Amino acid sequence: MTKNSKGTTKYRVVSGFARSSLHERGFVLILILIISAILAFFLVPIPLFQSQSVQCKLNVPCSSVGWHLGPSLFRRIFPDVSYGPPITKSYISTPTPLLPESETLKENPNITSTWQTYTDRVNNFIIKYPKSVTQTESSPEDTYIPICNNYLVCLLYPESMVPKTDFVAAGVFVSKLNDKNTSDTCYKFDASDNFIVSKVVINGNTFYHQTRGSVAAGHQQSTQYYRSLNNNTCLEIGLRITTETRSANLPPSEGYKEFTPVQEAKVTSDLNQILSTFQFTK
């Protein structure tokens, strides 16, 4: 009798333990599903509708009208958060060059016929620019990463072209590299081992092209460099776009929004049109 009673008691304890384990497993499974749903809600890219087609390169569309994946909700709320270690200053490369290797770039007179022309008779080149772009020798005072600084000519693409966004300014500048008057020195870029160098033909002249960028204190810049040696003079053309984190710090009620990939592609296309007008005169 005692033996049977103990056996029965033992059986009941085991059965209760089994039911408890099943309940705990079910709770853990539900908890995992809830956490996964929350992470997906914040981290999955949000679909955005693009209402107009934008060209990344001359006469070549990079994105069409329709739905595209945009930044996630987490990235919109915390744009400065990095998935890696904190960055104070570093250099980054763009995976796809602005102008692929062996591409030929030519001016389109239908677009540039009414543009103004800058002529440099000392270094023997001309470059054209629209009225919306300003020829200047300095960047705006509040620009953390300058667009223009001691160049032969600088064409500033102002913030007003893309207002109320993270966009700060962009521009095209031409500089003379006095210490690089041979092909070996002119076409040797800094950090050549880390950034792709390709050839680009602009109006019949061969240029060596490299893309570099940097980030620092919430500011970012991406610059396309083009170098060509003409009459033992090494000239470098730069196309630069600078941004800073504003949309996360300013209230949406003031109308500030993120500088979108579509807007960046439009700015890039406009800078390319200016680049296509560069010509050597001798």
Image (cartoon, helix red, strand yellow):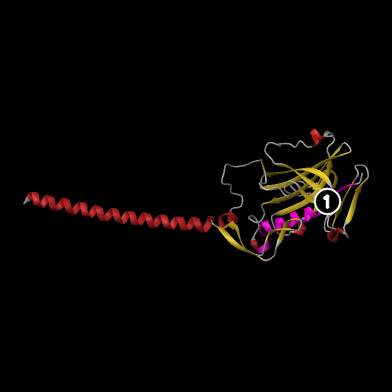
Q: Quadrant of the C terminus?
A: top right
Asked if residue 139 shows in the view, the reply is: no
Q: Secondary structure at mark 1?
A: strand
Q: Is residue 3 left or right of residue 184?
A: left
In the depicted structure, whether residue 62 falls above or below residue 101: below
Start-end of magenta stretch: 253-280
Look at the magenta stretch and give its main secondary structure.
helix
| Viewer-side residue, 163 vs 53 | 53
Question: Which residue sits at x=81%, y=35%?
Answer: 183
Asked if residue 194 shows in the view, the reply is: yes
Residue 102 in picture, x, y percent from top left: 75, 46
Q: Outermost residue, right direction? A: 121
**What is the number of callouts on the image?**
1
Q: Is residue 272 left or right of residue 252?
A: right
| Residue 256 sits inside the magenta stretch | yes
Question: Which residue sits at x=50%, y=57%?
Answer: 40
Residue 68 in picture, x, y percent from top left: 61, 61
Q: Is residue 4 left or right of residue 153?
A: left
Based on the displayed image, in which of its 4 quarters is residue 175 positioned? top right
In the depicted structure, whether residue 195 falls above or below residue 135: above
Q: Amino acid at mark 1?
A: Leu
Q: Outermost residue, bottom direction? A: 51
Q: Is residue 98 left or right of residue 276?
A: left
Question: Which residue sits at x=59%, y=42%?
Answer: 86
In the depicted structure, whether residue 231 falls above or below residue 102: above
Q: Outermost residue, left direction? A: 1
Residue where numbered disc 1 is placed: 155
| Residue 144 sits inside the magenta stretch | no
Residue 278 in picture, x, y percent from top left: 85, 49
